[in-house]
Amino acid sequence: MNQTWKRFLSLILALSMALSLMVIPAYAAPEDEDAAAEPAASADTTAVADSEQEEDALPQTGDAEQAAAVAETDNSTNSVLPSTFSISSNALGTMSVDAASVQADADVAVANEVADTAAEPNMNDPVVAAVADELGEVTVQDENGNQVALTEEQKQNVLGMFQQYLQQWTENANVLGVQLPFFLSYNDSKEDGLGILGEMLALANKSVDDVRSGAYSYDDLTGTIMNFMYGDKLGVQYYGDKVLAQAKDAMAAVEASGAQNEAQRLLVLNDWLAGVDSFDMSYIMNMGKDADKRAMVAEDEQKPAHYDDVHQELYNAYKPQIEANFESQIKDEVTKNFHDQIYNGIVTNLRAQYYEKAIPQVLIQSGKTEEEANAYIEANKAAIEKDPDGFVKENFPDAADQLIAGANDFVKGAETDGIEVPEGVTMTVEQMTQAELNSEEKKVDLDQDGTAELTYAEAIDKITE
């Protein structure tokens, strides 16, 4: 998705992270406190009302989209987060949560939700049919920068989102005016055209060269459509009545002029528009530039109108998915942490078992009797089980390499082929680990009072609830 959405999601992630961790003894610490957000992307640009008009005259028609775009450049209100967090828990040690993955999963989930609520694409509509044809030719960059075709699911998601965008525009065409398929005329010939989606990407701050070469991601594509959807939706919500009032005034001026034909009426309308509208040149010239490289800067910058309203609208759209995905990652990390502890414990036990059988052979070869060798093992059993390799290195330095190599082979065999466990069942280390994780026996002492009060499954749910 484009940078407008990415920067806004940083704020949501910070809040949801705090909420998710309040119920467990944990803290979140950025691994890279110097992480910086990327340059802002822009949304649609349209004519805006002249500042000389009275306060309730037609406001800037781009304000709703500007507010969505400015959300990512206002450093006073946005959090800048790294892509990965370390979360330390008294019970589990350190876990890692990939914030970028949380965000990407939320992007996909919200896009899918939008697509799922859209009506069945009307393939008889030439615009929808044209977009469907484009999707068959589009290639996007994957996470490794490779050009790949869209999957069928991705094509259907994009088409569903576009259908919903188009339906919204159709229902409000009297306010929004002509948008499709006339976004941009940039050498848009049949041989080298940008297409409808390409034109939308170009207006959302992708260069024409990037669009033509496919230098954008699937998230850029879906994020762009959502930008247009929200820009139109909120534009109609905040300014629809004023746009219609101004249109009525414009038509009254045309009627009063006595113009006799279409050309004359258009000239009158052009003159009327020149008196009430102007382009927001600062917004246009500053698109995509860092704060210190903007061409036009006001002495006393103010938030665009409805900035906070747009912020809340986007927050509401993404918050449930961000929280759900974040909790899912926490649960996965907690599960992995328990898994690794169990797995490593089983491996340690296997190494101890091997040494308890191999060390007596070393002792017998050095002249000890079998009884003496077995007694030695019994006397040092706790030390061997606590740190098998360490015990061997400290007490049998001459034979340590050979013993450790044998233990390695024994563990490897258990990992790949399995070993026989009670009741004649052969299980690999992973199978034993899963059996332990799924055990209904209380084995987790979460409150560290010396008594295990939870199963592993109960502990995982408790920590991530």
Image (tube, helix red, strand yellow):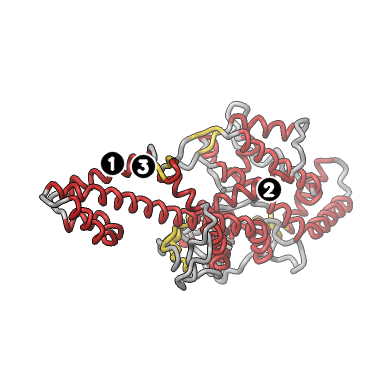
Residue where numbered disc 3 is placed:
414
In the image, residue 98 sits, relative to residue 120, either above or below, namely below
The three-letter code of the residue at mark 1 reads Asp
Q: Which of marks 3 and 2 is nearer the N terminus?
A: 2
What residue is rendered at 58% in x and 29% in y?
192
- Left or right of residue 269: residue 453: left
Q: Distance between the residues labelled 3 and 1?
A: 9 Å
Q: Which residue lies furthest to the bottom in this view?
A: 449
The secondary structure type at the circle numbered 2 is helix
What residue is rendered at 59% in x and 60% in y?
70
The three-letter code of the residue at mark 2 reads Glu
- Left or right of residue 53: residue 208: left
Task: Tell me whether circle 3 and circle 2 mark residues in contact (CB < 8 Å).
Answer: no
| Percent x, y of residue 298 | 56, 67
Q: Earlier in the sequence, mark 1 or mark 2?
A: 2
Q: Which residue lies furthest to the top in this view?
A: 191
The secondary structure type at the circle numbered 1 is helix
Residue 162, which numbered label?
none
The three-letter code of the residue at mark 3 reads Ala
Is the residue marked by circle 1 packed among few (<14), some (14-19), or many (20+) residues within 10 Å?
A: few
Q: Earlier in the sequence, mark 3 or mark 1?
A: 1
| Percent x, y of residue 152 | 62, 33
What residue is rendered at 53% in x and 41% in y?
216
Mark 3 or mark 2: which is in front? Answer: 3
